[in-house]
Structures are given as C-alpha cells and as structure tokens.
Amino acid sequence: MIFENFVIFLSLATCVFADGQNQLVHCLHDIILRHFTSELTCVFSYQGSKDTLKKPSLRLQSGNMHILLAREDDIADSILRDLNDVSEKVLVVCNHECDNNVIKEESKDKHGSYILFHQNGDVIQDIRGQLIRLQSNSAWNPRAYFVVIALGPGGLPSQKRGIPETQIVQVFAEFWKYNVIDVIVLLQSTKLHSRETPTIEAYSWFPYSESGRCAQVIACVLLDVWITNKDGVGNFLHNVSLFPPKIPKFLSGCPLRVSIFESEPFVMYSSYSEDDNAVIYKGGLDIELLQMIQKATNMSTIFRQPPSDGTWSILLDNGSWTGVLREVIEGVSDIALGGSYYRCHITGNIIECTTPYIYDEIIWYVPCAQPNPRWASLSRVFKLSLWVGFIVGYITVSVIMWAVVRIYNMFTTAENKCSTYTNVTKCFLNLWAVILGVSATENIPQKAVIRIVFLLWVVYSLAVSTVYQTFLTSYIVDPGFQHQISTIDELLDSRLECGMFRSFDTLMPDLRPKRYDCRQMCDHTEDCARRVALKRDYAFVFSKINADYMIAVHYVDSNGHPLVCHLDEKLSRQYITISVQRGSPMLKRYNDVIQSVIQGGLLDKWWREITFQAILLAARNFTIPVGDYIPLSMEHLQSAFDLLIFGCVIALVSFLTEIFFHKRN
C-alpha cells in the first residue's frame, strides 16, 4: 500500500495531568490505526540532549531491530510502547546524535510516517532542527504522515491560556518550507467539558481555501475534537477525516513560477511585454503542454528570466547545480522545463520529475558530404579500371588495324591497296572518330579482314558510347556526393574538432577526453551548428529533436538539402520531463495532465504542426521549382564548356607554334 502525504503535529499544554497523557496516547493510537500504514517504516524523532542519554533507558523491539531510547518522560515511553505494538515493520529512533546510517534501510522504500517529539525549549526551533535532520536522509518522504508532540515549558501552551494561533501558524510555515501541507496540530483543552474531562482539539490549515490566498500560511482551522465519556473512553466527536484533500481542482489564478529558456522546438518565440518587461513565450511543445496544465489547474503562469549562470543545468564540482535546476532547488521557481532531460537519478533526491512525455536521443552531428564537382562528371562515369581498359583496347585495336592494313598491302596489287589506314596516326584518328560517332573516312576498306576489324570496333564503340552518354546525363543533372562520415571511428579519423555540450558530462561519462581527444566545449548550440554548416571543420553532439528542428529551419541549401547531417550511432537515449520541487503537492496533478495529453495524442498533433511550420519557413529559401524535370543550365554543362575551352586553347597554342616554327624555317 502506497503511503500518502500527511504530517501530524501534536502540541500539548504545559501543565498536562496524567489522565490527559493517557488520552493523548489513545488519541494518537486511533490516528495511527486510521491513517498510518503499518507496512512502511515509522521514524520517531526527538531533540534529546547528552544529559538525557545518561538517564535509564527503555529497550524496544520492532521487527528485526532493537531500539535504545533514553527515557525522558512517561508519555514518551507510552507512545513508543504503543508504536512498537502497532508497527509491523521497523521502528527507528533518532535523537540528536542520529546520523544518516541510523535511519538507513536496506530497502529503497521511503519512510511511511514520522513522529517528532518535543519536551523543552522553543518548539519552533526544535521542530525546525528535527526537520532539517530528517530531510537530509535519502529515505525522507515529505508526503508521509508526521506526528509532532510538544510538551513541557517552552512548548505550546494549553487552551486555558488562549489558542496560540501565531505559534501554530509558524509550525505550519516550517513544514511548508519542505512542501508539507497535510499538518494537524493537537491541543489539549478543557473548555468544552468539565475540568475533569480533558479534550484534544485537532487543527490544520488549507493553503488554497480562499480566493487570492495562494499557499500562504496565515490561519488555522479546527477539524475535530477528541472527547472522553464518564468511563474514560475517548473518541473523535465528528469522526471526520483528519487529512482531507487540500489541493482544490481549480486554484483561482494562483501563480505558477516557471524557470524556462528558449529551446526550439520546445520553447519558441520569446518576447517581452511592454508594461513590466516580463518575458513571454508563444510556441513550442513545452509551452503547449504548460498551457494545458494551466487550463487544468486555473493557475497563472509567471515566466522567470533565463538564468544568468547558463540555461541548461550543469553539475558543478561542489555538488551544486546551475541553470533552471538551481532555481527549482533553491525554491525560487516551481517547475523547470525547456526540453529538460530526466535527472532525478543523479540529483541526489533534491528534485522530482514528472512522467516523461517525449523520447529523445543524443547523437553526433557532422558536416554533410559536399556534392561532387560537375567538371568531374566526364570522368566519373567509368571507374579507373574501366578507363584503363578502354584506353588499352583503343591503342591495341589501332595498332592491330595498322598492322592488318600493312600486311594486306604487302600482298596485293597497287590498285587494291588501302591508303587510309597505312599510317598509325590515321588509325588512331579514324578509330577515335568512330568512338565519337562521327564519320571516320571517305575510303571504306574493301578487304573483308579489314572490314571485320573495323566492324568489331564500331560495335564496341557503340556500346561504350551509349552507356557513357546515358550515365553522363545523369551525373550532369545530379553529380552525387562525396564520402559522408557515417561512424564515430570515421569522425575521429577525420580530425574534425568535436564540440561537447557541457551539461552532457553528467549524463554520458563516455564523452570524456580519454577517447575524444578532439573534445571542445560547445556553450552555444547555434554557433556550433553554424560552424558545422558553413565552415565544415567542426562536429558536435546534441539532442536529436532540438538539432533536427534547428537544421530544418536554418541550415538547408537552396535545394532543400540539409547542411548538417547526423550519425546513425546513438550515444544515449533520454526522456524529457518537467522538474519540480522535492515533495511538490502539485506533482500528481501535473502527471494526470501529462497522461491525458499523451493518451489523447496531443503531443503528436503539436509536433506535426511545428514541423509543418518549420518546412514552410525553410521553403522560402528554395530556388528549385517543383516538378518532375530540371532544365539544364550553364552550371550543369560547365564541364563540357570547360573541356571545349581547354581544347580551343590547345588548338590555338598548336597553331601559333606551327606559325612560329614555319617563319623560322
């Protein structure tokens, strides 16, 4: 059985007679049976002194644990004996020397209930000290049941001396510092009955009972009264629940302080109001979710200015945090969001997290491969081995053609001699003309053997030329891309500088400099992405959702192709949540809204709308018209014109050289 959030404070009058002490024990016993969970651990805390420890002690046994308690008062012994009989699990006694090891359990369960006992001194200071000690333990549960018993001089006075509302309110305020709202104060009184019949009054407070009063501890409310009959049997007069629900469905515009910063696509479109210069956000996944929470609770959102020590939270060497988490931990804000990852497993139980609502990945982003130069399209059609084979075949056939003609002319008459292929140069030129698909010669060979060699070359050239022209057209239109970095090993071998986000160190210890000697700190994601896209000498690791949206909007070329690509290898999988204060009474309400949003498919709807807007924003820079064909331009045929100009230059140089040598001769 899961234990709910409740705190009980018992404050008794200074002059308590014996029958009143017995009734207090009976009243506490009734509360334990009605509201406590016996399967969970009960912690008994008192602010003892060293002198107290010298007194005779009482040894109790509960479960597998023996507890040695210094005896201060008979009522304390009675309470402990009663707890020992009722509690089925472990009863832990914690005094002023109690350290973290004394109340540490082998199980990871939170404590189920607490009883704080006060005897002498100032009750406010005593309760404050005990709360500080208890909340430092890892099993501290602000949603457990707390019973605080105050007796003796310096404690809360009896009802004879007037209801000490000021002190009661101060006690409530001490508990509210730790987000504890279900508090009961029990006061011994005789005003409702005869002097011999004591009563105990149960007081509590409601943080949102009145419109405009938002979690302000300013008043207390009488819940019920413990009375006794003539036979000494006690019971609660109205028998109402001592722990009624205290968080209303609608909070009447109470403020919700939000630590936030702009982080696309979670938080977008920041602006400042003209009246009070307050920051306003008008778009993003987290903003949409926050608006749903606001509508469900009727709270008014107050956005805090982005933290001055950095937006994303970083764990410092001294164990403290920066950024939005620091503000939540210090209590200056109620929640923190902005695409924040789940960190409750590494924050040491100083914050709590809502139900995760988005799944994200951390991956590497590298420069996208550059398009192959269009001038290289002429040579990229065939591989080097095929080009070598083609050239060797061309030379071989030319030589064979020349040899066949020479042999043929040696054994034929002068009238039948072939004069076209008698020269090696003519053979090379004529066969090259066949490759280009132009006229080879005016004198067609008459001999069958020469025609066979020539025909074989024509067939070969036709096949090669057809394939070449087909692929050449494709490469001119789409030259393809150079090698793309696709693995982490290729990234490390590329000698690119590696940008690391500082807050990822606590999430992924594998990103240490031991492997990534190219490691550099990347404090501003936009600057890192711009360097990757434009300078192409950088790579960085970041959230997939954030980076993909930023690239789609800001870093695409005129054809709609991204300038920044990512590796397929995933470094880490993360869950995005909302961080809240430890023990926040609104956590269950937040989780209910998040579950409704997920089950209703609203997150998917918001994401589709945001990505559609991103596509429209990026499409404004596209220059390629929509259609099934692309008209060839000067850019596509640049390699052909470059080759033509190069050939003209060679021809001109050859012509001028011939003129020069002709004049010299």
Image (tube, rainbow, N blue to C red):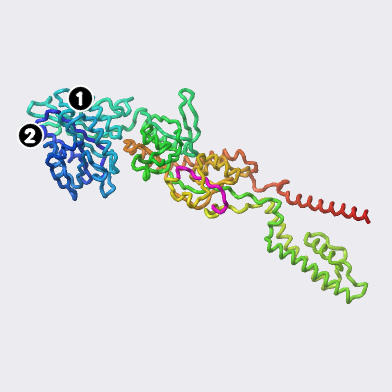
Q: In this orientation, does residue 289 appear? A: no
Residue at the spot x=57%, y=52% of the render?
Answer: 494
Q: Please identify the quarter of the rendering in which residue 51 is found.
A: top left
Q: Residues within 10 Å of mark 1 (few under 14, many from 20)?
A: few
Residue at the spot x=39%, y=31% of the render?
Answer: 257
Q: Quadrant of the N terminus?
A: top left
Residue 462 against residue 288 in the figure, above or below: below
Q: Please identify the quarter of the rendering in which residue 169 is found.
A: top left
Magenta region includes residue 18: no
Magenta region includes residue 503: yes
As drawn, the label of residue 164 is 1
Residue 143 against residue 444 in the figure, above or below: above
Closer to the camera in the image, 597 or 271: 271
Q: Is residue 536 left or right of residue 47?
A: right
Instruction: Tell me the mark number nearer the camera, choosing from 2 and 1.
Output: 1
- Residue 200 placement (x, y as % from top left): 15, 30
Q: Residues within 10 Å of mark 2 (few under 14, many from 20)?
A: few
Residue highlighted by disc 2: 232
- Residue 359 placement (x, y as % from top left): 44, 46
Residue type beneath disc 1:
Pro
- Image marks 2 and 1: residues in contact by CB distance under 8 Å: no
- Residue 585 placement (x, y as % from top left): 31, 36
Q: Is residue 167 left or right of residue 378?
A: left
Q: In this orientation, does residue 239 appear? A: yes
Residue type beneath disc 2:
Gly
Q: Secondary structure at mark 2?
A: loop
Q: Quadrant of the C terminus?
A: bottom right
Residue 92 against residue 465 in the figure, above or below: above
Number of residue marks: 2
For the record, the magenta segment spans 492-504
Q: Is residue 644 left or right of residue 351?
A: right
